[in-house]
Image: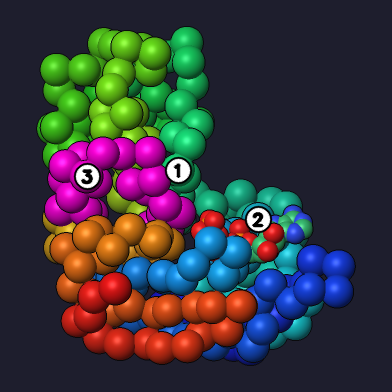
Amino acid sequence: MLVIENVTKKFGNKKVLDGVSFKADAGEFISIIGPSGAGKTTLIHALIGAEKIDAGRIYVDQYNVNRLHSNKIQEYRRKIGIVFQDYKLLPHKTVFENVAFALEVSGYSKDFIKKRTTEVLRLTGLEDQRNNFPKELAGGEKQRTALARAIVHDPELLFADEPTGNLDPDNAIALAHLLLKINKGGTTIIVATHNKEVVNTFKKRVIAIDGGKIISDKKNSGY
Ligand SMILES: Nc1ncnc2c1ncn2[C@@H]1O[C@H](COP(=O)(O)OP(=O)(O)OP(=O)(O)O)[C@@H](O)[C@H]1O
Ligand SMILES: [Mg+2]
């Protein structure tokens, strides 16, 4: 489902990604780990088509991600889900509206949107917060709202960059279990994180990068 071949990305003269190659099958769960500055966020940005690469190829299904024109980029983005560390919630919309909004822009019927949004709020444990605004939420609830929004359209592939970065240890582990549950539902997941406990909770494939290079790639692994 995902093939990344010899990807190189430079910022100025510095190679931030240096010959990165790996494949992911449908249904896999991959943690990308490595120290600060290793290139994790740059790699996620390249995978979602938010950052151009200098050499190599990235394929997700039939999408040649680095070569997409803007209308195709929009189409590709609608097929994937993305969770960022800083949530990016809409402040003047409630939890329900933030999650539903992702479906409204895709033109689904009102009934479908209500049904699907309610279902996803249940999955992410946000039923009681559905009418709250982001400023009324705890960090863990904001992050779960961001996750609910990212999966409401049932993406085949979910990318998350430090999804537990702003959470306390208990909330981080709870979010890790939620990601595992979403993966069990069939969504392929790629998470960039340096949270050891979270990676050890996943016990899934771990790709370690350092200085823009893959230094290990292990199945059923930990940090
Ligand atoms: N837009 C940019 N312009 C110049 N350099 C950049 C840019 N974005 C990232 N870098 C550099 O690329 C390197 C990798 O950054 P990246 O954000 O991918 O690391 P990371 O592994 O996600 O780190 P962290 O764990 O702190 O999030 C760093 O040295 C960073 O300073
Ligand atoms: Mg990062």
Question: In the rendered structure, which segment of residues is drawn in magenta?
Answer: 158-179
Q: Reading the chain from its start, which is encountered first: label 2 or label 1?
A: 2
Q: Secondary structure at mark 2?
A: loop
Spatial CA span between label 2 and label 1: 16 Å
Task: Where is residue 145? Give x, y as percent.
Answer: 32, 31
Which residue in the protein does label 2 denote? 50
Q: Quadrant of residue 184?
A: bottom left
Q: Quick check: 203 left or right of 105?
A: left
Q: Quadrant of residue 103?
A: top left
174, above or below 203, in the image? above
Which residue in the protein does label 3 denote? 169
Q: Quick check: 114 left or right of 1?
A: left
Tell me what residue is drawn at x 15 percent, y 53 percent: 177
Q: Amino acid at mark 2?
A: Ala
Which residue in the protein does label 1 denote? 85
**In the rendered view, how is the structure colored?**
rainbow
Residue 162 included in the magenta stretch of the image: yes
